[in-house]
């Protein structure tokens, strides 16, 4: 297997800039995790006080649920905290994902990005697609069909046609064990909110965003990052795409500088909060003209689904 080509940081940054860009922090990562949960909490408080704001709350919370994943992604690279144990603990307990399962998978993606062995290649390979196809995908996301298929599709298929020697009950038990973290945390969430008289709030501003807006913004992220990026390219500046994001796009679609994806693939040692600075320095030196860049998410979708 042939690994993707790599850049040399000293070809693009001087020693002082590179040291500043790659500096780990003892407070920035924890602050971002706290910020993410604070935004989610604030959206829930607003929703409890003014239920008519729930549709907006779904967007805000779904975007911050993606934000938790983005911060866990930084932790997979050891960037969320200067201390590796604290880094992993933050991701495991406060970012809601299995860091230890994700890390080897994701590092393989980086090693073979856009090469035949890239495990994420399946996400970008179908593009371009028709606008009708994109609309159908968006509809499935917003109606919860994507979430249901991803979360329970395998179980449904097995229940319809059980493997030899397996009962439907054993399949249900095995699935419950597999999804025990998801089931237990959400049962506890519903119970705790119900005791406070707001059981509906957990469903409306945690589960509903997870089932609708989160699948949509995750899809948009995947499209923006690698769709229509050349496969097996030898140019490391064109293995991923950076998409400029407006304030509204950052609030609704692209939290915590996830849109600077080309810079992330070029320099995996840079924490997410320093990616805008890296982009500025590359732009200053005329490097961004050689990179895959789109001016916004709407323009990216027009490229990914041209007609």
Image (spheres, rainbow, N blue to C red):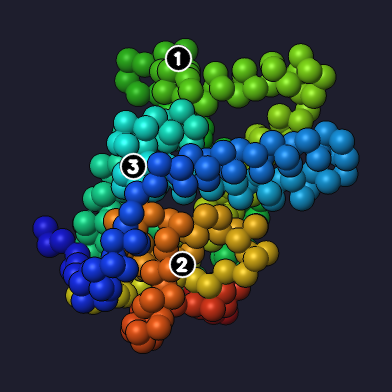
Query: How far is the residue under mark 3 from the one under mark 1?
Result: 40 Å
Q: Earlier in the sequence, mark 3 or mark 1?
A: 3
User: Percent x, y for residue 173?
Assistant: 45, 14
At label 2, counting other C-alpha atoms closer than 10 Å, the crowd grade (few under 14, some 14-19, many 20 or more) is: some
**Local SS, label 1:** helix
Q: Nearer the viewer, mark 2 or mark 1?
A: 2
Q: Residue at 69% of width from left, 36% of height from top?
A: 41
**Local SS, label 3:** loop
Query: How far is the residue under mark 2 from the one under mark 1?
Result: 46 Å
**CB under 8 Å between callouts 2 and 1?**
no
* Residue that label 1 marks: 173
Count up the numbered dots. 3
- Name of the residue lying farthest toward the front: 16
Q: Earlier in the sequence, mark 2 or mark 1?
A: 1
* Residue that label 3 marks: 82
Quadrant in the picture for residue 250: bottom right
At label 1, counting other C-alpha atoms closer than 10 Å, the crowd grade (few under 14, some 14-19, many 20 or more) is: few
User: Percent x, y for residue 60?
Assistant: 68, 49
Q: Residue at 48% of width from left, 64% of height from top?
A: 259
User: Percent x, y for residue 109?
Assistant: 28, 54
* Residue that label 2 marks: 276
Q: Nearer the viewer, mark 3 or mark 1?
A: 3
Query: How far is the residue under mark 3 from the one under mark 2?
Result: 20 Å
- Against 251, is 227 above or below? below
The quarter in which the C terminus is drawn is bottom right
Q: Residue at 56% of width from left, 65% of height from top?
A: 133
């Amino acid at each position: 297997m042939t690994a993707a080509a790599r850049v040399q940081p000293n070809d693009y940054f001087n020693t002082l800039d590179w040291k500043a860009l790659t500096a780990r922090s003892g407070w920035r990562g924890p602050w971002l995790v706290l910020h993410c949960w604070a935004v989610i909490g604030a959206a829930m408080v607003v929703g409890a006080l003014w239920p008519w704001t729930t549709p907006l709350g779904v967007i805000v919370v779904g975007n911050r649920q993606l934000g938790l994943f983005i911060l866990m992604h930084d932790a997979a690279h050891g960037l969320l905290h200067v201390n590796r144990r604290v880094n992993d603990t933050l991701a495991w307990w406060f970012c809601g994902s299995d860091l230890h399962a994700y890390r080897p998978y994701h590092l393989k993606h980086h090693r073979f990005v856009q090469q035949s062995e890239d495990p994420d290649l399946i996400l970008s390979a179908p593009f371009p697609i028709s606008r009708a196809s994109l609309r159908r995908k968006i509809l499935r996301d917003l109606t919860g069909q994507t979430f249901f298929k991803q979360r329970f599709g395998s179980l449904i298929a097995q229940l319809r046609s059980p493997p030899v020697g397996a009962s439907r009950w054993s399949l249900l038990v095995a699935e419950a064990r597999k999804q025990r973290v998801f089931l237990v945390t959400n049962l506890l969430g519903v119970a705790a909110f119900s005791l406070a008289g707001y059981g509906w709030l957990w469903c409306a501003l945690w589960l509903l965003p997870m089932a609708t807006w989160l699948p949509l913004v995750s899809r948009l992220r995947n499209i923006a990052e690698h769709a229509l990026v050349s496969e097996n390219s030898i140019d490391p500046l064109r293995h991923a795409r950076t998409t400029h994001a407006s304030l509204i796009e950052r609030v609704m679609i692209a939290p915590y500088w996830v849109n600077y994806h080309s810079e992330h693939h070029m320099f995996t040692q840079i924490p997410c909060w320093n990616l805008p600075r890296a982009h500025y320095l590359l732009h200053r030196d005329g490097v961004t003209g050689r990179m895959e860049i789109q001016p916004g998410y709407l323009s990216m979708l027009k490229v990914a689904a041209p007609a």
